[in-house]
Image: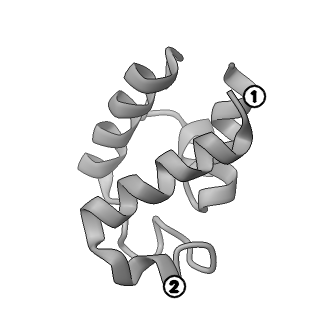
Amino acid sequence: MKKIDIEKYIVNYFIEKEGKGIKKILFKINLLEDGIIDSLDLVTISIEIENKFNIKINPNTSETLKNFTHVKKIVEYIFSKK
């Protein structure tokens, strides 16, 4: 799996969740601090990523919180676990 494929998946996830307008700001914002991801969303996206990429993510760790602040960090995190 290439990073660009992971990025497309993540971007599409947020477009489905927030609408097409999110695409303009998605790479500029902190997903957690700006309220795009809350605790329930973190669990949901973790499960979806686990199923899609066959990796294990514990949404209750500081490592996960640190890596789910920005789209690029999520992509790098997934890519590192493959």
Quarter residue 38 falls in: bottom left
Quarter residue 47 falls in: top left
Percent coordinates x, y for residue 43 in the rendering: 31, 38
Of the 4 image quadrants, the one containing the C terminus is top right
Amino acid marked by disc 2:
Lys
Percent coordinates x, y for residue 73 in the rendering: 68, 52
Amino acid marked by disc 1:
Ser
Which residue is at a point 47% across and 73% down the rendered structure image? Answer: 33
Local secondary structure at mark 1: helix
**What is the spatial separation of the Cα atoms under label 1 and label 2, in whole angstroms?**
26 Å
Left or right? Give the position of 72 relative to 29.
Answer: right
Please tell me which residue lies in front, 19 or 42. Answer: 19
Quarter residue 35 falls in: bottom left
Which residue is at a point 68% across and 37% down the rendered structure image? Answer: 77
Disc on res. 80: 1
Label 1 neighbour load within 10 Å: few <14, some 14-19, many 20+: few
Which residue is at a point 68% across and 27% down the rendered structure image? Answer: 1
